[in-house]
Structures are given as C-alpha cells and as structure tokens.
Amino acid sequence: MISMEPGEKRLKQEDCNEDELGTGILTLTNQRVAFDKRKSRIADFSTKMGETVLDVPLNELLDVWKEGRFIKKICIKIKTNDGEKSYKFGVFGTGGWLEAIQDAVEDAKDQ
C-alpha cells in the first residue's frame, strides 16, 4: 500500500480493475494517483496487497476522462520517459472519480 507523505491526504480509494495491470486498489490523494496490485488466492479466499505499480504525481497527469457505455471506466493519460501512457480503471462511480481527480489537479496547481 502506498505510504503517505507529510501533508498528504487520501481523497478517494476504490477496489478496481485496470485493463492491463489487473486487480488492485486505486487511490487518489491531494498529491498523486496510485494503483496497488492485489494478489488473491481462490483456494483459501485470501487477499494480500502487492506492489505499487503506478504512482503518478498530479502534475504529470496529461488528461483524465471517462468512457464506456456498459462497462464504465475512468481513464488517465500520463507523461512517461517513452512519451505518454493511458490507464483505464473500472470503478463504480466514474463521474465522482472524474470530478475528484480534476479538483485535485486544480488544487495542486494552486499550491
């Protein structure tokens, strides 16, 4: 699970699935968006947190949008060393996530 920096506040968090990364926990803070992989075993119904596979400062988000008619996703585009990369997360309230990320990015710019 991501470790919080001094002054960092968790704004939103949800168990979800990302198209390429698989299942995990999507976390939005006042400083970044992070995705922690989750490992599950069906044999004993255990779940444990894996590594943080995405940890993006809000100022590196290039775009955020929602898409999908039946399977709704919140999508982000980030800067990488190789250009740009998009991630698509299957969350329940895409509108709420969209608004929360946009607000967090605006608030981060003001600081």
Image (cartoon, rainbow, N blue to C red):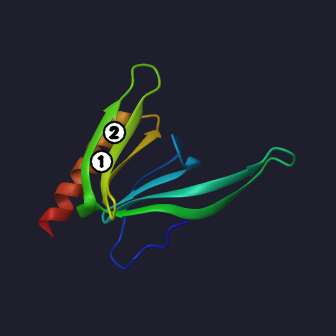
Residue position for label 2: 96
Residue 85 position in % (x across, y down): 36, 51
Residue type at mark 2?
A: Gly
Above/below status of 29 relative to 71: below
Q: Residue furthest bottom?
A: 6
Q: SS for tag 2?
A: helix
Residue that badge 1 annotates = 100
The extreme left residue here reads 110
Residue 11, by quadrant, is bottom left
Q: Find residue 57 and report its horizontal and vertical position in percent.
A: 31, 65
Q: CA distance from mark 1 to mark 2?
A: 6 Å
* 16 up-or-down from 10: above or below: above
Give residue 82's quadrant in the image: bottom left
Q: Residue at x 42, y 29 (%)?
A: 72
The quarter of the image holding the N terminus is bottom right
Please report contact status of discs 1 and 2: CB closer than 8 Å, yes or no: yes
